[in-house]
Amino acid sequence: MAKELMNEAERFLLQHWEEARLMEESMEAVRNKYKEVFQRIVDAVTEAHPELDASAVYATQFWGQGYIGFGRKSWPGGDTNWPSGLWMSNIRLENLATENSDQPSATIEISSKVKKGNFDTAAAKAELTTATQELFSPDELDRANKSDTGNVLLRFAAPSKSELMAMLADGDGQQFVARFVAQFDLMAKLIPVLDKIFQQFTASKP
């Protein structure tokens, strides 16, 4: 018996093609506005922290879960599309709107685009953790946690999916922008420590 060309869901779309097409166009318009919001975030973060002269935004690409990151060109991978530095992940709209998807994540990472060589990940994590004790308020300290996974040097509590979706839908999106900026402001307190860590790494490279 020949396999049916269309499954049940696809037959439903055929029967409601005009409405589905309008929905498709609306979704694309939302994605474009989402890109614009992230450009506002980039502008605000780099204005507040001009030393962060490397950035990357992948908020709508379907190959990933959505990422935005800031680093320095002098840090490892600073001349690539994935610089070492401050990152937020799991921020693609499809991720925020899906119940069983991962919550957004805020991290400090060393770029996966560089050969780590003699980079002492454990020492870097320890140095960052010690710095948080000195630089962060008790409330801020509660939002920073040790991490021992891969390229992640330090992980922070991040806004939830529901929180971000509510902010995105409210008004002109400025609350959404401000929430991201506040997250990067917190992580940016560690820029001098990262300068020291990454300078040592660069100096130790053959």
Image (cartoon, grey):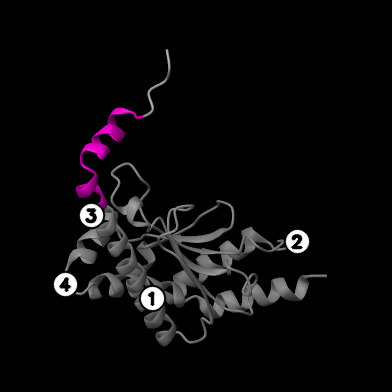
Q: Amino acid at mark 1?
A: Gln
At x 64% / y 60%, what residue is drawn? Answer: 121
> Label 1 neighbourhood size at 10 Å, few (<14), some (14-19), many (20+)?
some
Which amino acid, by three-letter code, is at mark 4?
Gly
Quadrant for residue 186, please give it.
bottom left
Which mark, by number, is residue 22? Answer: 3
Secondary structure mainly formed by the magenta segment? helix
Front tag of 3 and 4: 3
- Cβ–Cβ below 8 Å for labels 3 and 4? no
At label 2, the amino acid type is: Gly
From the top left corner, tell me how far across and down residue 169 is, in percent. Answer: 19, 64
Instruction: Answer few, some or many: residues within 10 Å of disc 3's Cα (few below 14, many 20 plus, some between 14 and 19).
Output: few
Q: Give the mark, 2 or 4, whose residue is nearer the N terminus.
A: 2
Tell me where residue 93 sits by quadrant. bottom left
> Real-space Cα distance between discs 3 and 2?
52 Å
Q: Nearer the viewer, mark 2 or mark 1?
A: 1
Residue 11 covered by magenta stretch: yes
Report which residue position mark 4 lands on: 171
149 relative to 176, above or below: above
What whole-number distance in Å separates the C-alpha atoms at marks 2 and 1? 34 Å
Q: Dot 2: few (<14), some (14–19), or many (≥20) neighbours within 10 Å?
A: few
Residue span colored magenta: 6-21
Which of the two discs, 2 and 1, labels the residue nearer the N terminus? 1
Mark earlier in primary sequence (4, 1)? 1
**Residue that mark 2 sits on:** 117
Q: Are marks 2 and 4 in contact (CB under 8 Å)?
A: no
Mark toward the start of the polypeptide (3 vs 4): 3
The residues bearing labels 3 and 4 have C-alpha atoms spaced at a distance of: 24 Å
Q: Secondary structure at mark 2?
A: loop
In the rendered image, which quarter is residue 118 located in? bottom right
**Disc number placed over residue 39 in the picture, else none:** 1
Residue 22 or 91: which is nearer the viewer?
Answer: 22
